[in-house]
Amino acid sequence: MNHLEDNLDGISDCFTGRAKFEIVITTHHKPDADALGSTLGLYHFLKSLGHRVSPVSPTDYATFLQWMPGNEDVINFEESEEVCSELVETADLIFCLDFNDLSRINKLGEYVKASNAVKVMIDHHREPSGFDDYRYWTINTSSTAELIYDAILKYGSLDSIDQKIATCLYSGIMTDTGSFRFDSTSSNTHRAIANLIDKGADSAEIHRRLFDNFTLNRFRFMGYVLYQKLEIIPEYNTALVYITREELKMFEAQTGDTEGFVNFGLSVKDVVFSALIVDRTVLVKMSFRSSGDFPCNEFASEYFSGGGHKNAAGGSSKDSLDLTVQKFRKLLPQYSKYLKS
Ligand code: 5GP
Ligand code: MN
């Protein structure tokens, strides 16, 4: 069922440009290509209608994302708290993309909560916390970028999609579908992609920029993880990688450098659940992926204060890395009905 909660007709002036607004667009911390692509896609669209629009990221993000059209206009809240808080306070509308709980935007969330602006959430994650006034929300769409595309078609028009918008939205859809592999890839996804290519998105170039753009260190780090760190727990068809602070230092890991590592395990025969556990300075951060029925989001929310989708979720732990890994191992037997072949 493609259940969509949509009351954007209440702000249709914003999509037609009949009235002009001061708008902030924001997305979750450490934005990935879907978060950034949907932010910048919507940014170009709203700007073309004559609104004053500011894209704000709660944190920095990976260098391999820093080429999207409009990237230079993104304001990093951590670097420019005063500017961002002012923009949020005085905005008429704040678009919140690819997240549905203000905890996902760190301290920026306090300013968003306090602002009198109308809050609009466009998102595809489970269980929105309900901070929004307007929403375009479903869990059945591949990516927030696809939702932005759908919303532009519904409330604006295909004609208003230019090459910049197309490039940003293509990037978000392509990465959140695992290059059109995941279950969430629908015929609508492919129709959207076809139209975005017609509007000038250069598919081969976008793939190159996103996937063939790593530092040598990052590549060596990947090799090290595959050779030394990927562990298979055969009785539970589970793959596990955990990474220490020393290892992050050893490979001079930058923001985004461990992205994708969680997927390696799922490419091993019979593995249905894969976990990546990384010792970040403040927290131990966890990523989960599954194929089939194992509910990553339940696992993440029940035990690691996280959430996400059935096949892709994340969470964190305030325990040490060792304790977190121990806890993870001990939990597997409880899920044996999903994990045992
Ligand atoms: P990733 O593993 O790529 O960081 O995240 C995968 C999915 O899980 C994303 O859809 C993301 O929104 C969700 N997710 C990751 N970390 C957290 C978290 O700490 N809390 C919640 N609620 N969701 C998370
Ligand atoms: Mn997304």
Image: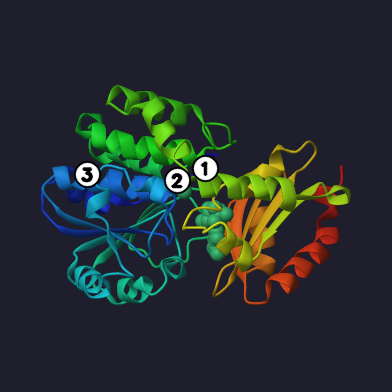
Q: Amino acid at mark 2?
A: Leu
In this rendering, would 115 be left or right of 298?
left
Residue drawn 38% across the image and 35% down it: 170
Q: State the SS at label 3.
A: helix
Q: Earlier in the sequence, mark 1 or mark 2?
A: 2
Q: Amino acid at mark 3?
A: His
Residue 251 image position (x, y, % from top left) = 56, 56
- Name the one closer to the observer, 334 or 254: 254
Q: Is residue 78 visible?
A: yes
Residue 249 image position (x, y, % from top left) = 56, 64
- Name the one closer to the observer, 273 or 308: 273
* CA distance for labels 2 and 3: 24 Å
- Which quadrant of the figure shows ligand 1? bottom right
User: Mark 3 vs ligand 2: CB under 8 Å?
Assistant: no
Q: Is residue 311 visible?
A: no
**In the rendered image, which quarter contains the C terminus?**
top right
Residue drawn 72% across the image and 53% down it: 229
In this rendering, would 206 be left or right of 290?
left
Splitting the image into 4 quarters, where does residue 114 fall? bottom left
Q: Earlier in the sequence, mark 1 or mark 3?
A: 3
**Residue labelled with disc 2:** 4
Q: Are marks 1 and 2 in contact (CB under 8 Å)?
A: yes
Residue 260 image position (x, y, % from top left) = 57, 46
**Residue labelled with disc 1:** 140
Splitting the image into 4 quarters, where does residue 158 fall? top left
* CA distance for labels 1 and 2: 8 Å
**In the rendered image, which quarter contains the N terminus?**
top right
Q: Are marks 1 and 3 in contact (CB under 8 Å)?
A: no
**Residue labelled with disc 3:** 44
